[in-house]
Amino acid sequence: MTMTCNEALPLVWSYLDGELSEAQAAPLRKHLLECHGCRNSAQHGKTLKRWFVRSAADEVAPRGFAARVAQQAFAAHHAARAAEASEYDEVETSAGASGEREDGRVFAFVLRLTAIAAVALFVLSLVLRFQALPATSGLRADQRAEPTLEEVKRGLEELNAKEAARARPVGHATEQK
C-alpha cells in the first residue's frame, strides 16, 4: 500500500527528529522518493533544523575552562571587595559621607511618602466601594410612572393643535377682520 501526501506530511517532522520506528519510516522514505512536493517539504524541514540543532562537538568546553572561570571570578570578587573597603574608609573620613547620608534621607522620605500615598489610595478605594449605590426594582432613569394611554392621546392632540396653528397662513387671519 502506498502512502498519500495527506498521510506523509504530518509524519515528516517526526521523521526528521528520528521519532519514527523503522516500520513507519520505510513507507515514508519510499513516498519521499516518489513525491516531489513532500520531498521539498522534508528538505525545507531539514534546512530549518540545521539552524536550530547543533552537534555535541560544538557544545564541548575546552579542558579546564570551568576551573579558570571560577578562579577569575573569585579573584575579581576579592579584588573588588578590597577596593570597596579602601574606598569606604576614604569616603567615611571625607566630606562625601554627608552627601551620601543626605541621599539616604531623601530616599527614605520618598519611600515613606510613597507608602503613605498607597495607603491613602487603598482607603479611598474602600470608601468608594462601600458607598451606598442607587438601587431600584426597575431600570428607569426617571422616577415618574408610565403615562396612561389617555394621557398619551391628550399629549398628541395638543401637539397636533400646535402644528395646525403654525401651519395656518398669516395673511389668512388678517383677511377675516
Image (cartoon, rainbow, N blue to C red):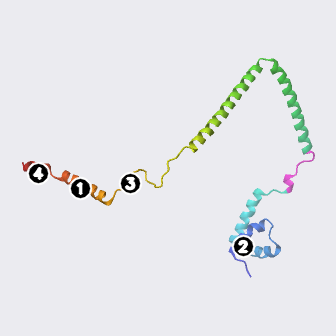
Q: In which quarter of the image is the N terminus?
A: bottom right
Label disc, if present, on residue 8 of the rendered structure: 2
Q: Earlier in the sequence, mark 1 or mark 4?
A: 1
Along the horizontal axis of the image, is 15 left or right of 126?
A: right
Relative to 27, residue 155 above or below: above
What SS does tag 3 mark? loop
Q: How far apart are marks 2 and 1 (CA)?
A: 79 Å
Q: Earlier in the sequence, mark 2 or mark 4?
A: 2
Say if mark 1 contacts mark 4, CB within 8 Å.
no
Label disc, if present, on residue 172 of the rendered structure: 4
Q: Give me the residue at 88% from left, 49% from top.
A: 61
Along the horizontal axis of the image, is 156 left or right of 139?
A: left
What SS does tag 1 mark? helix
| Extent of the magenta region | 56-65
Q: In which quarter of the image is residue 104?
A: top right
Nearest the eye: 141 or 146: 146
Mark 1 highlights which residue? 160
Q: Give me the residue at 37% from left, 56% from top.
A: 146
Q: Distance between the residues labelled 1 and 4?
A: 20 Å
Q: Quadrant of residue 69?
A: top right
Label disc, if present, on residue 145 of the rendered structure: 3
